[in-house]
Image (tube, rainbow, N blue to C red):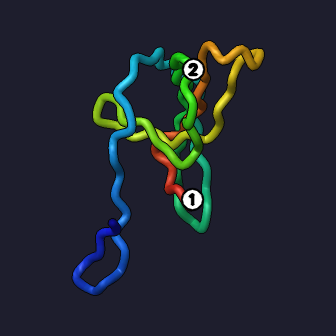
Amino acid sequence: MSTQDSYGAPVESWSEVAALWAAKEPLSGREFFDAQQVFSENVTRFRIRYREGVDTTMRIAHGGRLYNIKSILDPEERHQELHLLCAEGVADGG
């Protein structure tokens, strides 16, 4: 069932998939210019136990912040843990 605003346009909504334990590791931060605006980006790795179905359309909510999942790594393809490389603070175009 989709949600619509008062004009009939679809409204994006998020739902919780799971609450997990994770190790959070800040990796880097940078600023860049685009279309005469300054953006900042913080790259953070979250390490979680392996789980099926995690993809880059998802995001992580942690400590009142939102992190967009940009890359998912399965170290040595052993299906024991996942490394989720995430960006915070970026104007996300998709």
Q: Amino acid at mark 2?
A: Tyr
Q: Look at 71% across and 17% down and name the residue there.
A: 75
Q: Look at 60% across and 68% down and name the residue there.
A: 35
In the depicted structure, whether residue 17 falls above or below residue 36: above
What's the mark number on residue 50?
A: 2
Q: Residue furthest right?
A: 76
Going by the image, does 77 lie left or right of 54?
right
Nearer to the camera, 2 or 82: 2
Query: Callout 2: 10 Å neighbours few (<14), some, many (20+)?
Result: some
Nearer to the camera, 70 or 10: 10
Q: Work out whether mark 1 precedes mark 2 in sequence or the reverse, and give the earlier one.
A: 2
Going by the image, does 89 lie left or right of 55?
left
Q: Secondary structure at mark 2?
A: loop
Pick the quarter of the image with the N terminus. bottom left
In the depicted structure, whether residue 31 falls above or below residue 29: below
Query: Residues at badges 1 and 2 in contact (C-beta under 8 Å)?
Result: no
State which quadrant residue 81 falls in. Answer: top right
What's the mark number on residue 83?
A: none
Q: Look at 26% across and 77% down and name the residue there.
A: 5
Q: Position of residue 2 (x, y in %)?
A: 34, 68
Pick the quarter of the image with the C terminus. bottom right
State which quadrant residue 80 falls in. Answer: top right
- What residue is pinned by disc 1? 94
Q: CA distance from mark 1 to mark 2?
A: 25 Å
